[in-house]
Amino acid sequence: MRLLPIKDPERSWRHIKVQWKKDAEGVGEDFASFGGISAFDALTSKEADSQGLYYLADHERVHAVCQVRRLLMSKYTAPALSVRFVNVSPIYDLGVADMQDYAQILLTLFSGVVWLSRDALAASHIRFFLKSPGDSQFFAALRVATPLSPFSKFTIEGALIECSLKEVAAPIAEQAAS
């Protein structure tokens, strides 16, 4: 799965909504009342070039959407990514997919944001707002400090994950040349 920017928010979001409407109606749910959709409708209707909208997809379907913004915040000395408006396909919210699949989607989305922080949206900190405080259980293992962890700090309070990333070591070839 890949976390990709929604390049043409109006057209792409419309495509995602069509897919998700079919998912919801497939289990007898009214998609118009589905939570979180109105926030994305508002974000996609703004005229700015990029509202920081991303989608998590595999080759078959879009599993989640969110807004990722790179910000300078007074509490940090380096840029931070702020992730809000996390929405998942109705198949996860309505129980078509099981809890393990739901947890995997949230973890994959978070991993995609970590990747963005190391690449396209360089940042040293991440503030990831979960859908609910109950979702924090899926991230509990990341609180444990290990040598291979990419995090120098990882906290969860309510529905907010805050983490700071360790500095990336220079590749071995660069170190040898120094």
Image (cartoon, helix red, strand yellow):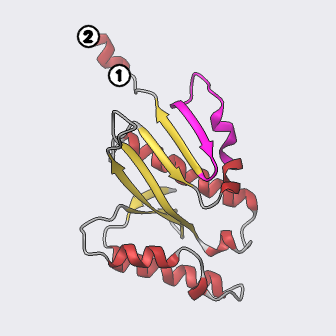
Residue depicted at x 25% and y 69%? 48
Q: Which residues are magenta?
A: 138-159
Task: Estimate how packed mark 2 is, as few (under 14), some (14 to 19) or many (20 or more) residues with alpha carbons within 10 Å.
Answer: few
Residue depicted at x 43% and y 51%? 82
Number of marks in the rendered image: 2
Q: Which mark is residue 57?
A: none
Q: Secondary structure at mark 2?
A: loop
Q: Position of residue 135 (x, y in %)?
A: 67, 55
Q: Is residue 88 left or right of residue 2?
A: right
Q: Which mark is residue 178?
A: 2
Name the residue tied to disc 1.
170
Q: Position of residue 80 (x, y in %)?
A: 38, 43
- Three-letter code, disc 2: Ser
Q: Position of residue 57 (x, y in %)?
A: 50, 63
25 falls in the magenta region: no
151 falls in the magenta region: yes
Q: Is residue 66 left or right of residue 106?
A: left
